Amino acid sequence: MASSSSTSGELAYRISAAARHPASWLQLLKFGLVGLSGYVVNLAVFAVLVGPLGVHHLLAAVLAFCVAVTNNFLWNRYWTFEPGEAHPAFQAARFFVVSIAALLVNLAVLEALLSATALTELPAQAIAVAVAMPFNFLGNKLWTFADSPSPRETQGQ
């Protein structure tokens, strides 16, 4: 049990320490911009697949998600967090796990908002994405790209 509480304490300390550094906030801004680019990529791929190519909307959604996650991984790996020492495939697998976890948070919040409020789908989704984003960011900062240089280490470079 001590292991679990020490891990939780360490995580809380790491989050608190990161929040005190402006470079962490810049990373969060970059992460948001990458997420926005992934959103645009997702919609563009989806539109091409269901439109001119005539792909079924469910398959198109899965393929668009895959392209967008790849886009986001590459931009986050090389621009937001820097690659670090880990193998790209290892980080990609972690990134995908974090993305799925954030999607589950998004879906839970979306469903809760739609069932408990008078919000329509689009505003509820906008809120759900905003709620899930910090979980996604922290998961990637503290797990996927944990071996990447910290903001303090890169400030002098």
Image (cartoon, grey):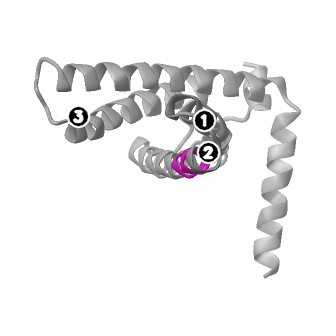
Secondary structure type for disc 1: loop
Could you tell me which secondary element the residue under label 3 belongs to? helix
Q: CA distance from mark 1 to mark 3?
A: 27 Å
- Disc on the earlier residue, 1 or 3: 3
Q: Which residue is mark 1?
A: 119
First of labels 3, 2 by sequence position: 3
Report the span colored magenta: 107-113
In the figure, residue 148 lies in which quadrant? top right
Query: Which quadrant: the N terminus?
Result: bottom right
Alpha-carbon neighbours of circle 3 within 10 Å: few (<14), some, or many (≥20)?
Answer: many
Instruction: Say which residue label 3 marks.
Output: 60
* Mark 2 burial class by Cα count in 10 Å: few <14, some 14-19, many 20+: some
Residue 86 as seen in the image, left or right of residue 67: right
In the image: residue 64, left or right of residue 53: right
- Give the residue at x 81% y 38%: 18
Give the crowd class for mark 1: few <14, some 14-19, many >=20 residues within 10 Å.
Answer: few
- Farthest front residue in view: 118
Evaluate if marks 1 and 2 touch, with contact meaning CB atoms under 8 Å apart.
yes
- Report, in whole angstroms, how far the alpha carbon at label 1 lies from the one at label 2: 7 Å
Q: Which mark is residue 70?
A: none
Q: Quadrant of the C terminus?
A: top right
Residue position for label 2: 113
Would residue 157 appear left or right of 96 to someone viewing this image? right
The image shows residue 60 at horizontal and vertical percentages of 23, 34
In the rendered image, the vertical position of residue 120 relative to residue 154, given as above or below: below
